[in-house]
Amino acid sequence: MSTTSSARNSTWRNWGGNVCARPAREVAPASVAELAAEVRRAAEDGLRVKAVGTGHSFTSIAATDGVLIRPSLLTGIRGIDREAMTVTVAAGTPLKRLNTALAREGLSLTNMGDIMEQTVSGATSTGTHGTGRESASVSAQIRGLELVTADGSVLTCSEKENPEVFAAARTGLGALGVVTAITFAVEPLFLLTAREEPMPFDRVIAEFDQLWAENEHFEFYWFPHTASTNTKRNNRSAGPERPVGRLAGWFEDEFLSNGVFQVAQWVGRAAPAAVPAIARISSRALSARTYTDIPYEVFTSPRRVRFLEMEYAVPRAALADTLRELKAMVDRSGLRVSFPVEVRTAPADDITLSTASGRDSAYIAVHMFRGTPYQAYFTAAERIFTAHEGRPHWGKVHTRDAAYLSGVYPRFAEFTALRDRLDPERLFQNDYLRRILGT
């Protein structure tokens, strides 16, 4: 049987601490059949339904005052098809568990984001992505989906079966049903060589097209209040494996990137005037390094310092102008920004509401330390992003609504029409979906 929360109206909070909700009840179904029964029961009780993973979204996409479904018992690999090179995994499986399990089987996803705490369904439903010249988001690697729809039925979809649902549900925003299993394309485990090195801001912008073209995965971090960036290039390697040493890894990835960085954020929050000096020190703290390892060890990093984040996808051709405008805004604004700005790319894909749907995209992510006023910075950044027809990440802070989003997504009406068909009574509705998809 599924487990139901005994504490009625207990408060749920997201990872960033900026969203909370008081659901009427929480349930953790132990099977797809139990989940379908909970959906039917909620409908009978007149309650809305939302599934929540690890709460890594900064929006209220998973918040509900109805039934909160936790997929914590729906985990693990259902099966590996080595002929088709796919893996089918239950929706509540954390990406971390999937990555390590695949590696043990000599397999890997092609690309992934920079953290792996999220569940597979939470990550794909919000459009989680890494960076890649040809390889796209986590959702773009989906080959099949299973979801429970509003009437409690179980729907399977792929390019051949219910293709119109497949086109949308790979990044479904929790609006079309509750995802219960995902089939991903996988490939034999491979090695990546990562090359990290500082580079001046102006040089990265001037040479960006070349850096993008020459590397399978290119990204960089710009430190506001400085003219410095830290770049990272990941490319496939024949080996040998040369991982970051345990001591060096602890020093750079834990001590500097999490421990010292956390202290720097505390100092910056207490004394905003110190932020530019801290930024200059931070931009020089990480030295160049090269290492070769299996994909998830290269793509992902531990992120223990809590923050709030806004990220927009702009057309890749608009990246240089957008970043220059962002830098000029910070330089003249008097804002004190203690977190680096992250820049990544993705090729166009064919997912209805993917942030890269139909266009080659560049992602610009702005962050602020949790507990620091962020509205002025995010509002000014959002003004710049939207001037370039930016598309907000569905799981990160933004203020856009259906009127704006229907203008930057050519297939927006296709998604809302499908939602009308699958969830006419809006069982999976919440305030966030009402804002971004309209009524």
Image (tube, rainbow, N blue to C red):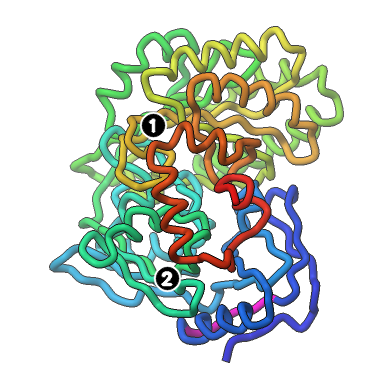
* Vertical arrangement, residue 25 with respect to residue 171, above or below: below
Position of residue 419 measured from the top left corner of the image (x, y, whole percent): 47, 59
Q: Does 85 lie within the magenta span?
A: no
Residue depicted at 52% across the width and 60% down the height: 174
Position of residue 388 measured from the top left corner of the image (x, y, whole percent): 49, 20
Most extreme residue toward the left is 83
Per the rendered image, the range of residues in magenta is 26-31
Disc 2 is placed on an element classified as: strand
- Residue labelled with disc 1: 345
Asked if one can make out residue 289 in the rendered structure from this viewpoint, the answer is no
Position of 35 compared to 261: left or right? left
Asked if one can make out residue 361 in the rendered structure from this viewpoint, the answer is yes
| Quadrant assignment, res 339 | top right
Badge 2: residue crowd in 10 Å (few <14, some 14–19, many ≥20): many
Q: What amino acid is found at the position of numbered circle 2 in the picture? A: Leu
* Vertical arrangement, residue 183 with respect to residue 148, above or below: above
Position of residue 370 measured from the top left corner of the image (x, y, whole percent): 74, 40
Foreground: 36 or 360?
Answer: 36
Position of 21 compared to 403: left or right? right
* Vertical arrangement, residue 338 with respect to residue 323, above or below: below
Q: Does 30 lie within the magenta span?
A: yes
Q: What amino acid is found at the position of numbered circle 1 in the picture? A: Thr
| Quadrant assignment, res 426 | bottom right
Badge 1: residue crowd in 10 Å (few <14, some 14–19, many ≥20): many
| Quadrant assignment, res 216 | top left
- Are discs 2 and 1 less than 8 Å apart at CB? no
Position of residue 317 measured from the top left corner of the image (x, y, whole percent): 37, 18
Spatial separation of the CA atoms under disc 2 and disc 1:
29 Å
Residue 431 bears which disc, if any? none
Q: Quadrant of the N terminus?
A: bottom right
Foreground: 246 or 264?
Answer: 264
- Residue labelled with disc 2: 147
